[in-house]
Image (cartoon, rainbow, N blue to C red):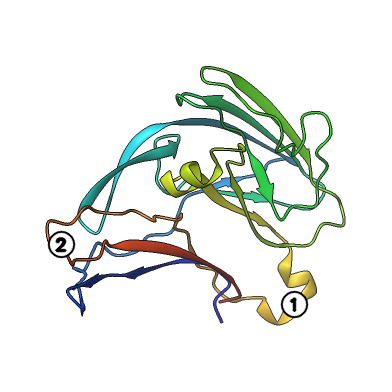
Amino acid sequence: MIRSIRALSIEALADDHAAAVAPGVPLTAPTDLVRRHGQLHVDLTAAPGEYTIGGERFEGMLYNDAYIPPVWRLKPGDMLTVALHNSLQQPTNLHFHGLHVSPRGNGDNVFLHVGPGESFQYRIPIPHDHDSGLYWFHTHAHGFVSQQIIAGLSGAIIVEGITRRYPMLRGMKERVISSPDARMLRRSTKPREQERCATTSNISASS
């Protein structure tokens, strides 16, 4: 079984033939930001950036200049604080997808927009009875959501403790593969050639 995977699937068609995808560098695990003494503080800057997929360079929007941000690791009962700094030319914000947390105050409020050049600090108390598992954070600024997520503004959150519910997973090695939605379209010089497109599948299981 595979414990936590966000898999990137790529389909390429050109003149009714599948285009070959050159082998890339070996997959590496994302780094971790791990809670300490019941707290996790993240300093997060959203800014324009470039990254390479399959040998091709794309312009996008990145958190802390990373195409794959570190995985945030928490436990039920922890306090998550995120200082979001907006270095984009458009509003942005954060949504903590799947977490059962409040939108009140400095919470998970998708209607709050952080303007260009502005900062905002989120305070997200994780309930003591919160389910463990794989979750994700991403921009949710209305009118800009799809564009910003496709450009790279997302990352993974793991709430620890899954072995308490599923003890048979104890001792199994965890592997995390994380890939944002990279629905990048490339202009074609051939009239009938279809553009290459990459889409994201979200899967959570165990390994």
Left or right of 149 in this view: 19: left
Residue 100 percent across, percent down from the top left: 80, 52
Q: Nearer the viewer, mark 2 or mark 1?
A: 2
Work out whether mark 2 precedes mark 1 in sequence or the reverse, and give the earlier one: 1
Query: Along the line of sight, which residue is nearer the eye, 17 or 21?
Result: 17
Residue 120 percent across, percent down from the top left: 65, 23
Residue at numbered disc 2: 191
Q: Which mark is residue 36?
A: none
Residue 170 percent across, percent down from the top left: 67, 76
Q: Considering the numbered disc 1 on the image, is that residue within a helix, a strand or a loop? A: loop
Q: Considering the numbered disc 2 on the image, is that residue within a helix, a strand or a loop? A: loop
The residue furthest top is: 117
- Which residue sits at x=60%, y=76%? 206
Quadrant in which the C terminus is drawn: bottom right
Report how far apart the C-alphas of labels 2 and 1 lie in the structure.
53 Å
Residue at numbered disc 1: 166
The quadrant where residue 83 appears: top right
- Which residue sits at x=39%, y=56%? 183
Left or right of 88 in this view: 94: right
Task: Please say if 195 is above or below 19.
Answer: above
